[in-house]
Amino acid sequence: RRVILSGIQPTGIPHLGNYLGALSNWVKLQKSAEPEDKLLFSIVGWHALTLPQDPAALLAARNDMLAVLLAIGIDPDRSILFHQDHNPHHTELSWILSCITPMGKLRRMTTWKSRLAAARNSGSEDMVDESMLNAGLFMYPVLQAADVLVYKATHVPVGDDQQQHIELTRDIADIFNRTFKGTSPLFPLPTYVNTPSKRILSLKDPTSKMSKSSPDVQSRILLTDIASQIQSKIRAAVTDSIQGITYDPQGRPGTSNLLTILAACTDSDVTQVAKAYESQGHGTLKRDVAEAVEEFLKGPRAQFDRIRQETSYLDEVARRGAVRAIEQSEVTMMEVKTRLGLASPV
Ligand code: TYM
């Protein structure tokens, strides 16, 4: 039996990278799961706090993300759909795991290293240490490990930017299992499940991934973008001046990114898509990509507009999700505490 768990930060409406790289896979997994598989999908409000948040905007973003997940087809009867911050077991386990996680492992996380590099670039000469960054950013992967382990998840579908965090989760689980032996290892080592579609890149700078934090709104397509916005963003996408279309992620990242998007939106194979456009120009490719993206997004967009208005339904889904999530994690927490000497054996 598999326990599949994933999470997304409530940092605004998801973009095409989140959707194709992660969320669409959640829906596919939900469809293909065996009846005995357990599925949990979480909106990770506590992770969002590692960056400054406006409270009103965060509240709205948490609700919007719930509406998005319902709109794209997460079924709250099949999957446990919940707000991470509604289940205190995540933070409780996170503290316990932080006490067995070596600092050196956290320093090696690329997400931490890139934050540090960004802080160093923006700081003055004498501010070249970690003092500008909050401790939450450093501890972020431990909380993520707790998200996974508190449900004894076996499979974690995420984009490749999260692979290192899942590897760390396995390390932490293994340290726990070896330190607190008991009769059998407590935590299964979770498997990283990569999405079939590759990393989606920024439309403006195809050497970096499409991201919510880029200041250039033209660099990403949001789930709520309408046809005209999609068209203008794709038309303005950075490509290259090479004749014809080929799939060459190293040499032609912009063109290849458009092919990746087209293949993902039409559920086809990228090399076959590339072959079909071999003798075409960028104009034709862009036109077809824009059409495919619009076709792909219009259903979820309409659903989102509808569900977003239904606030009492959203509250009910969140409440039910929290109850079901806590029910699952309670068992793990009792076992953890017993092994640590924080509770009597049950
Ligand atoms: P987050 O919120 O940054 O992203 C959510 C998911 O989207 C994927 N993703 C992408 N995939 C392809 N191309 C892109 N340009 C792109 N941008 C984002 C991410 O890989 C992710 O799967 N730390 C996590 C959230 C988290 C989590 C967890 C995930 C917290 N706890 C437990 C799994 C299990 C994050 O920040 O994802």
Image (tube, rainbow, N blue to C red):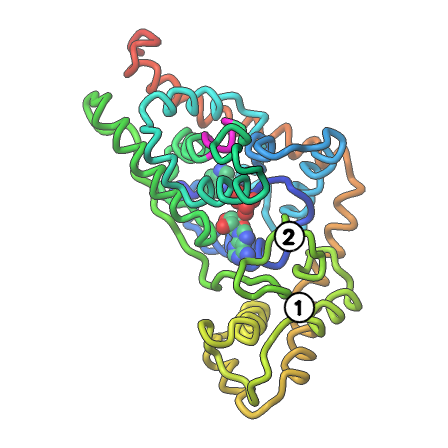
Judged from this view, the residue extending furthest toward the bottom is: 279
Judged from this view, the residue extending furthest toward the front is: 125
Q: Label 1, secondary structure: give it.
A: helix
Q: Residue at x 72, y 29 (%)?
A: 55
Q: Position of residue 16 (x, y in %)?
A: 62, 59
Residue on which disc 2 sits? 214
Q: Earlier in the sequence, mark 1 or mark 2?
A: 2
Q: Residue at x 70, y 74 (%)?
A: 291
Residue on which disc 1 sits? 293
Please say whether residue 21 is visible from this viewpoint.
no
Q: Label 2, secondary structure: give it.
A: loop
245 relative to 195 in the view: left or right: right
Going by the numbered disc 2, the residue's amino acid type is Ser
Q: Position of residue 250 (x, y in %)?
A: 44, 72
Q: Nearer the viewer, residue 206 or 153?
A: 206
Span of residues in magenta: 135-140
Q: In which quadrant will I find the C terminus?
A: top left
Please say whether residue 192 is visible from this viewpoint.
yes
State whether residue 325 is above or below residue 77. Answer: above
Task: Mark 1 and mark 2 in contact? Answer it, CB < 8 Å.
Answer: no
Going by the numbered disc 1, the residue's amino acid type is Val
> Residue 243's quadrant in the figure?
bottom right
Q: How many neighbours does mark 2 have within 10 angstroms: few (below 14), some (14-19), or many (20 or more)?
A: some
